[in-house]
């Protein structure tokens, strides 16, 4: 198994909008086009990301996507997620094409249902080895008739790297990406990342 390490946080230019304006950096994100590497036609609101036997603690990520008003459910929104493995790297098998060569095989796509809800079954990622970035799950969204864009990564409140400094730097794109993990009776981590679409 090949592994590939990348530094994603330097890819994005952040620009603060004026009050009431759409974010000017909304569509500037390297790698967002990876969301198109899967057909949208057969997506459901739930997906299993890891192959059978993938090492790591099981994790279920759920959430609800709403319009910019913060209330109206947003149906038919494509949500693309990818993350590292239990060793903190993006694993590949060697036959990947496109963005899979960088994002690895721990990635998945869903389309929100009529209630705006989505669900991923996966494993809990580890942070990059030797780095100061917390463990995270990248999220890219694609609304109908709009270009794809990234939102704040899912990070875990119990991660010591999610400290005051990290929280102060958070952009809160799509709402806060900081989630509180809890374990169920089957020892699966449960987290919820609700998403508010950008204006």
Image (tube, rainbow, N blue to C red):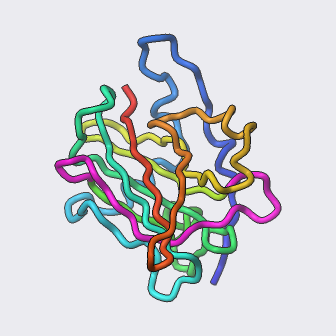
Q: Which percent across, then down, holds residue 50?
A: 47, 76
- What residue sits 44% from the left and 49% below the top? 193
Residue 136 placement: quadrant: bottom right
Point out the residue furthest to the left here: 114
**38 relative to 27 in the view: left or right:** left
Q: Main secondary structure of the magenta part?
A: loop
**47 relative to 168 in the view: left or right:** left
- What residue sits 61% from the left and 29% below the top? 14
Point out the residue furthest to the top here: 19
Residue 86 placement: quadrant: bottom right
Q: Which percent across, then down, holds residue 107?
A: 46, 66
**118 relative to 42 in the view: left or right:** right
- What residue sits 65% from the left and 58% below the top? 135
Q: Which percent across, then down, holds residue 19?
A: 47, 11
Point out the residue furthest to the front here: 185
Q: Which residues are magenta?
A: 112-134
Point out the residue furthest to the bottom here: 53
Determine if the magenta segment contains residue 128: yes
Determine if the magenta segment contains residue 160: no
Residue 12 placement: quadrant: top right
Q: Which percent across, then down, holds residue 124?
A: 56, 68
Q: Is residue 24 above or below residue 136?
A: above
Q: Is residue 163 above or below residue 199?
A: below
- What residue sits 46% from the left and 64% below the top? 190
Q: Quadrant of the N terminus?
A: bottom right
């Amino acid at each position: 198994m090949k592994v590939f390490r990348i530094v994603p946080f330097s890819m994005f230019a952040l620009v603060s909008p004026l009050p009431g304006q759409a974010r000017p950096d909304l569509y500037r994100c390297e790698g967002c086009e990876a969301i198109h590497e899967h057909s949208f036609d057969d997506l459901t609101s739930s997906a299993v990301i890891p192959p059978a036997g993938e090492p790591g603690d099981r994790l279920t990520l759920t959430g609800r996507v709403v319009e910019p008003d913060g209330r109206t459910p947003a149906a038919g929104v494509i949500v693309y997620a990818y993350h590292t493995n239990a060793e903190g790297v993006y694993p590949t098998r060697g036959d990947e094409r496109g963005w899979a060569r960088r994002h690895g095989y721990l990635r998945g796509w869903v389309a929100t249902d009529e209630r705006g809800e989505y669900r991923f079954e996966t494993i809990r990622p580890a942070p990059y080895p030797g780095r100061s970035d917390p463990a995270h799950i990248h999220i890219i969204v694609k609304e109908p008739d709009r270009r794809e864009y990234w939102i704040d990564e899912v990070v875990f409140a119990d991660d010591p790297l999610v400290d005051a400094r990290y929280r102060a730097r958070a952009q809160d794109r799509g709402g806060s990406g900081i989630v509180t993990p809890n374990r169920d009776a089957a020892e699966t981590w449960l987290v919820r990342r609700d998403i508010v679409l950008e204006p």
